[in-house]
């Protein structure tokens, strides 16, 4: 397992795709965006699901957490069944978010990766994407890394996704 943690528009999805290209074995890439897209639309509207405020703040409710817990357990089950998995996530809850992953991934070999990106660079990417609430990237750039320790960190403001993937690939198996 490789778990990528970084703020919105930090480059995690691009790194995951590049990892699939540079690693010699086949790896599945799954991300929190896939989970959100799979949820009923009503969970993106109310306080029980996930809410994206106008200022970029993201809050999650109890119903979202239930589905997220099941999704995380499913990702862990894929890894236990033999799949190599790259997870692209945003640890909005900081250390608590990582602890939730650690619990479901217990017993698995996991490489924890911090994907950093300067807030202004991430905000520019967010604007160019056009599919994010303005302000999320800047709000999350540092928030998701507070209190974190990683096996490896990369900075997508300083290096292209393929370069970051090569650094991460060099650490696979050493975690």
Image: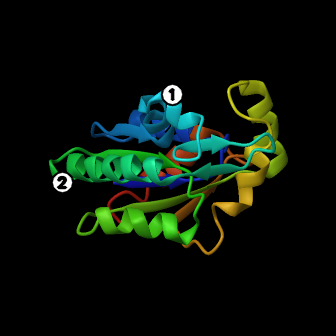
Of helix, strand and loop, which one carries label 2? Answer: helix
- The disc placed on residue 41 is 1
Near-viewer residue (107 or 152): 107
Near-viewer residue (97 or 63): 63
- Write the residue at 33% across / 45% down: 85
| Relative vertical location of residue 79 with respect to residue 131 in this rendering, above or below | below
- Write the residue at 63% across / 60% down: 144
- Write the residue at 21% across / 50% down: 77
- Residue sitting farthest toward the right: 120
- Write the residue at 46% across / 41% down: 31
Near-viewer residue (66 or 46): 46
Q: Residues within 10 Å of mark 2 (few under 14, many from 20)?
A: some
Q: Residues within 10 Å of mark 1 (few under 14, many from 20)?
A: few
x then y, percent, for residue 34? 45, 34
Question: Which image quarter: residue 146?
Answer: bottom right
Residue 45 is left or right of residue 27, and the answer is: right
Among the two numbered marks 2 and 1 on one chain, the one whose residue lies closer to the N terminus: 1
x then y, percent, for residue 14? 56, 35
Label 2, label 1: how far apart the Cα atoms are = 31 Å
x then y, percent, for residue 109? 29, 64
Residue 175 appears in the figure? no
Residue 32 is left or right of residue 60, and the answer is: left
- The disc placed on residue 80 is 2
Of helix, strand and loop, which one carries label 1? Answer: helix
- The disc placed on residue 102 is none
The N terminus sits in image quarter: bottom left
Q: Nearer the viewer, mark 2 or mark 1?
A: 1
Residue 66 appears in the figure? yes
x then y, percent, for residue 157? 74, 46
């Amino acid at each position: 397992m490789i778990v990528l943690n970084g703020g919105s528009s930090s480059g995690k999805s691009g790194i995951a795709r590049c990892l699939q290209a540079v690693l010699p074995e086949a790896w599945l890439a799954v991300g929190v965006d896939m989970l959100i897209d799979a949820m009923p639309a009503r969970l993106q509207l109310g306080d029980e699901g996930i809410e994206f405020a106008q200022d970029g703040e993201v809050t999650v409710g109890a119903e979202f957490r239930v589905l997220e817990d099941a999704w995380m357990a499913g990702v862990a089950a894929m890894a236990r069944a033999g799949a190599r998995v790259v997870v692209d996530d945003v640890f909005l809850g900081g250390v608590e978010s990582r602890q939730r992953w650690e619990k479901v991934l217990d017993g698995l070999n996991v490489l924890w990766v911090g994907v950093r990106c300067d807030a202004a660079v991430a905000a520019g990417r967010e604007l160019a994407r056009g599919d994010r609430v303005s302000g999320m990237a800047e709000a999350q750039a540092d928030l998701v890394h507070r209190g974190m320790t990683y096996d490896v960190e990369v900075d997508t403001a300083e290096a292209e996704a393929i370069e970051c993937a090569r650094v991460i690939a060099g650490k696979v198996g050493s975690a």
